[in-house]
Amino acid sequence: MLSFVPTTCPYCGVGCGILLVVKDGQVIDTQPWPGHPVSEGKLCIKGWNAHQFVHHPERLTRPLIRDNGGFRESTWEEAMSLVARRLEGVKEKYGPDSIAFLSSAKCTNEENYLLQKFARAVIGTNNVDHCARL
Amino acid sequence: MEAVRHLVKEMLRKGTVQGVLAPVKGPGEGGLCPCFVTTEREADTIALDSYYPFSLAGLVARQVGKGVRIGMAVTTCDARALIELVKREQVDLDQVFVIGVECEEGGFSFPWCLRCEHLVPSMADVAFYLDGSASANTEKGKELVSLISVPLVEKRETPPEARERALHRQEEDFAELAGLEPKDRLDYWLGYFDRCIKCYGCRNSCPLCFCKDCYLQPHKLIVKPGGNPPDRLFHLARLMHIGDSCVNCGRCEATCPMGIPISRLYHALYKELSPLFDYESGFDLSSLPPLGMITEEEMKEPGVELA
Amino acid sequence: MTEEFEPNILGFLCNWCSYAGADLAGVSRFQYPANIRAIRVMCSARVDPALVLKALMSGIDGVLVSGCHPGDCHYMKGNYYTRRRMAALARLLKVVGLEPERVRLEWVSASEGVRFAQVVKEFTETVKALGPNPLKKAKPWKR
């Protein structure tokens, strides 16, 4: 009925430990993880509200493609092909340095590595930055 | 401790409750985590021999809600907080079986534990004492102790000598501040309030802060919005709302990332208001929170001072 | 040449008694210092001590909370709650290090125009003697 799931806060690079309070399958609250070596049972305001996006009614659940000024739902395959095609097109027309990549502390280290590898090796640009610098 | 675990297991086996909220040994290296114990294996990890920096009473009020029969294995301060929540109609006491555990005097060496003068959970349904005995303090408690065999004794209160020593330690703790000139005391507190990063941790972890539409939210425009550190009113407004019933559980200070000695301020105010209103928080269900009630005698008093 | 300190005083006046009393003082031309700004509340019990604290945090030098005499409250029991809250607030101010004399509770009825003027005059003197609110000078932490 009620369980406390230990996990890591997704919001920034510190990686504080949080306990998600799960009631009947819904994540309803966040508690700090006492004794966690990094956060020692304390959280910042983002950590205290880390549960809010999980069941939020406005949370995106499918890829959306811009269409006639609005958005239409799509599949991952269609969205990925569209992005690949358009990025290739931009790279051909304007050169690789016309594309920039912005990553995030919410991604794992592995995902960030992949992104910068993609930027440097596949596209051929050094324009890689991170949300923490903004 | 074994006796508590045994009782919890029996309660689950018999189906008295859906589960028992208790602190358990957490994952990794330690620290206690909250758990809604529903299996025997979980019950074997219940640990009430350290301070746990979360309030199970607060969890019952905010997360569990009413309509579910549960048990709680808690220390005295948490049990007091639960009684305060019952007075504020946030918890239905008929649905909650409270197992209280006696605390060792100053055993946890946190500043609020050292100041604490209430070691024995005399308001719990079943109270387990340090010498291994237990007492059934209520009708519900009698139902529970019948499930296990443990040396039974009469209901106890905190021994007066321990209370005296705690009051002495309180005086020492507050002496530093009481001895300061008001101007210096103000500088001391404002200096600490300026460390605040407005994480709302103190409000979230306080068992007595249950308001869903909290006064301190920015859109209420009471605490000036958009500031960090926040308007000093943040701490003082909360103090005014909670101060009459603070149980000195210390969760606010334990969870503050900036190390602001919040419980020192709140406990100090509570110690001032407790004799003024003749109110002891967390024990007697029939004495309501002082700022929300008035007495017949008071209504005869014509002056501006409280008699 | 130094200017004499003129305090800013905020008055929470209950609609049925104190505000009417202040009105009577005005109509009868009883003089009282102009340092006070009146806020009309329906009952003195509406005054949350946190609001009084907010006034002090904002730099106001003195706060006067005024209601009906005990037993005469338009809502029967409001002023009893006010009395409890102001007593608690006075203790809070003491614990934090602000001067409890900056907050005063008074009972002024609708017919007591003279008394209202008297109360404001006395309170203004008290606050003048206390000096400006120390929080006015205390700057918040600057980045």
Image (cartoon, coloured by chain):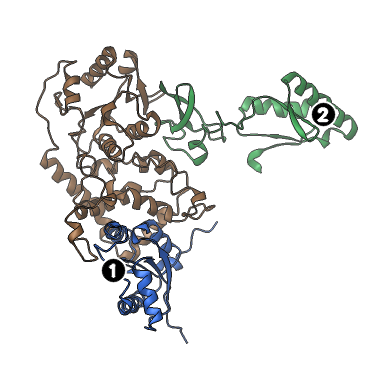
Q: Quadrant of residue B92?
A: top left
Give the Cα separation between the discs numbered 2 and 1: 76 Å
Residue visible at 76% across and 23% down? A79
Q: Specify the quadrant that holds the N terminus of chain A.
A: top left
Q: Nearer the viewer, residue B234 or B53?
A: B234
Residue visible at 54% across and 52% down? B226
Q: From the viewer's perspective, is residue C117 above or below residue B211?
A: below
Q: Which residue is mark 2?
A: A87
Q: Is residue C43 left or right of residue A50?
A: left
Q: x%, y% of residue A63?
A: 70, 25
Colour chain B appears in = brown
Q: Specify the quadrant that holds the C terminus of chain A.
A: top right
Q: x%, y% of residue C11?
A: 39, 69
Q: Which subunit holds the residue at mark 2?
A: A
Chain in blue colour = C
Chain in green colour = A
Q: Nearer the viewer, residue C16 or A35?
A: C16
Q: Which subunit holds the residue at mark 1?
A: C
Q: Are marks 2 and 1 on the same chain?
A: no
Q: Which mark is residue C107?
A: 1
Q: Quadrant of residue B55?
A: top left
Q: Is residue B44 left or right of residue A47?
A: left
Q: Quadrant of residue A54?
A: top right
Q: Which mark is residue B90?
A: none
Q: Nearer the viewer, residue B290 or A38?
A: B290
**Farthest residue, direction left:** B154
Q: Residues within 10 Å of mark 1 (few under 14, many from 20)?
A: many
Q: From the viewer's perspective, is residue B148 above or below residue C113?
A: above
Q: Amino acid at mark 1?
A: Trp
Q: Amino acid at mark 2?
A: Leu
Q: Secondary structure at mark 2?
A: helix
